[in-house]
Image: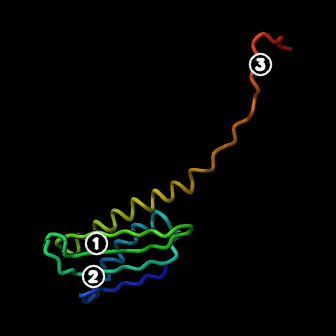
Amino acid sequence: MNLKISGHHLEVTPALREYVITKLERVIRHFDQVIDGTVLLAVDNQKEKEKRQKAEITLHVKGKEIFVESADTDLYAAIDLLIDKLDRQVIRHKDRLQGHQHEAIKYQPEPIIGEALP
């Protein structure tokens, strides 16, 4: 999997990079058909101080592109929220891929009332 981690108004330290990679391993364990991903870590200058630290990810999996974003006061907490949301979406995508392979229903015509059975 190709992974690009970048920062906006923020320097991505080796500790942040390692934290994101270890958290993404949980997602890859559930669904291994991930092609590539782009992570953006940002610090926004908003008036709301509760939602300043922001994390976004765009994950390209087989058959779909998944985008998730989260914001929190702490960047590590924002990454945790991001991974939780991403994990739920990846599991839902995997279930949808596997859920459409039902066994075919065999057709048996019902006898018409009043008709003699053989």
Horizontal relation, residue 79 to residue 97: left or right:
left
On screen, residue 102 above or below 61 = above
Kind of residue sitting beneath label 3:
Pro
Name the colour scheme: rainbow
Residue named by callout 1 = 79
Asked if the residue at tag 2 contacts the one at tag 3, i.e. Cβ–Cβ closer than 8 Å, the answer is no
Kind of residue sitting beneath label 2:
Leu
Horizontal relation, residue 115 to residue 70: left or right:
right
Residue named by callout 2 = 16
Instruction: Report, in whole angstroms, how far the alpha carbon at label 1 lies from the one at label 3.
Output: 61 Å
Q: Which residue is located at x 30 percent, y 86 percent? A: 7
In the image shown, does 45 or 4 lie closer to the viewer?
Answer: 45
Horizontal relation, residue 101 to residue 77: left or right:
right
Please state the horizontal and vertical placement of residue 78, each as a whole percent of the image: 25, 70
Q: Which residue is located at x 51 percent, y 70 percent? A: 61
Residue named by callout 3 = 111
Count of all numbered marks drawn on residues in the image: 3
Kind of residue sitting beneath label 1:
Ile
Q: Which residue is located at x 39 percent, y 63 percent? A: 87
Please state the horizontal and vertical placement of residue 116, each as a whole percent of the image: 83, 11
